[in-house]
Amino acid sequence: MSETESAWRVIVRMDERVRVLGAALAATDWPDRERQLGLARAHIVAEHARHWLQPYREHPCVTHLQALLVQDVPLSGLYAYGLSLAWDLHHQRQSTGLLLQPIPGLEGDELAELLASFKVDAHLDKFWDVTHVYWEQALSGAARVLADARVSDFLALCFDERRAPVFVPNLLYPGRLPLGIAAQGEAVCICPPPQAVGESKPWDYDDDPEWTQTVAFRECSRATLRGLPWSQFVDAATIDLLATAATVIFLRESDDLLGARAFMIMEIKRHGLTSLPNAVEALDAYVKARQLHGLHVMDGLHAALEKSVG
């Protein structure tokens, strides 16, 4: 496991479970789905993976994963399952805080065993060696960008939950969708590289530092919220709203007032988050109250939630 830890405990690392899942997705129809949506070009590692894995499209792991996609199993649930596995991908399950309600196809150890066999049968260790330079470049670029990001302390201030923020570069699939997963005391951001336009290759993480920092904090916020005991009683849209509001405040506190405003306007336009200004105001008041008076987290967050969506 290769990792870099900053003074603010932002860990940038590779995760074998994430890479094997991303490779298995490359052998399903997921890349075609992304192309049909008109998304930008995939990373060169993802393109190479599609060719490498062409002979394994009928592997039991791939057909099982394809069946889950047909059932519309969310990728967040799929990767939460992946991060619940031991590092060797075998069936030593851990609690992620996200699999509170069983998802069909993700119970038990069947997928874990299939992933472990797929890694061996598809010679993924050799593929990692062939593409080694791209993974190292992603690691070093992300580590430079996130070295001074005060993610851990600000997450604790917002949510009174100290999880180690982890950034996992994802050069495979999904190629456009960042994911925030709560796993074993960590808030994990699984992040594709910044997207370029059209047929241009994706940028490196340090080509767009503001984007990388913003996505890292938003997904770590989402993961932290999902790991809170009461999150199972709150719908996903509300979790996303609160995570986005926290990101706006994080950008403000990082002295990026223009970036915070631009991010908020973009989220309102892109996702129709018309209640985002109210959520920012409510969460900001809660954070300030915590700083001044030590407001109880449950009362404060519930009040912020009610004001945000009410």
Image (spheres, rainbow, N blue to C red):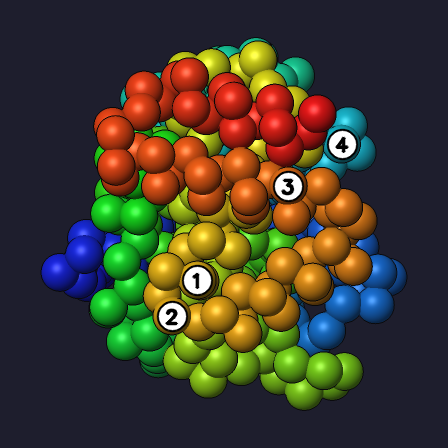
Amino acid under disc 2:
Asp
Residue bearing the label numbered 4: 72
Circle 4 SS class: loop
Labelled pair 4, 3 in contact (Cβ < 8 Å): no
Labelled pair 4, 1 in contact (Cβ < 8 Å): no
Identify the residue at horizontal 73%, vertical 46% (top origin). Answer: 273
Amino acid under disc 4:
Asp
Identify the residue at horizontal 45%, vertical 39% (top origin). Answer: 285
Tag nearer the camera, 4 or 2: 2
272 relative to 5, above or below: above
Q: Quadrant of residue 125?
A: bottom left
Cα gap from disc 4 to disc 1, whole angstroms: 37 Å
Disc 1 crowd rating (10 Å Cα; few below 14, some 14-19, many 20+) is: some
| Residue 130 appears in view | no
Q: If you read the primary sequence from the N terminus, does the residue marked by circle 3 or circle 2 appear first?
A: 2
Disc 4 crowd rating (10 Å Cα; few below 14, some 14-19, many 20+) is: few
Q: Quadrant of residue 117?
A: top left
Residue bearing the label numbered 2: 255
Q: If you read the primary sequence from the N terminus, does the residue marked by circle 4 or circle 2 appear first?
A: 4
Residue bearing the label numbered 1: 252
Labelled pair 2, 1 in contact (Cβ < 8 Å): yes
On residue 278, which mark appears? 3
Is 193 in front, or is 42?
193
Q: If you read the primary sequence from the N terminus, does the residue marked by circle 4 or circle 3 appear first?
A: 4
Q: Quadrant of residue 159?
A: top left
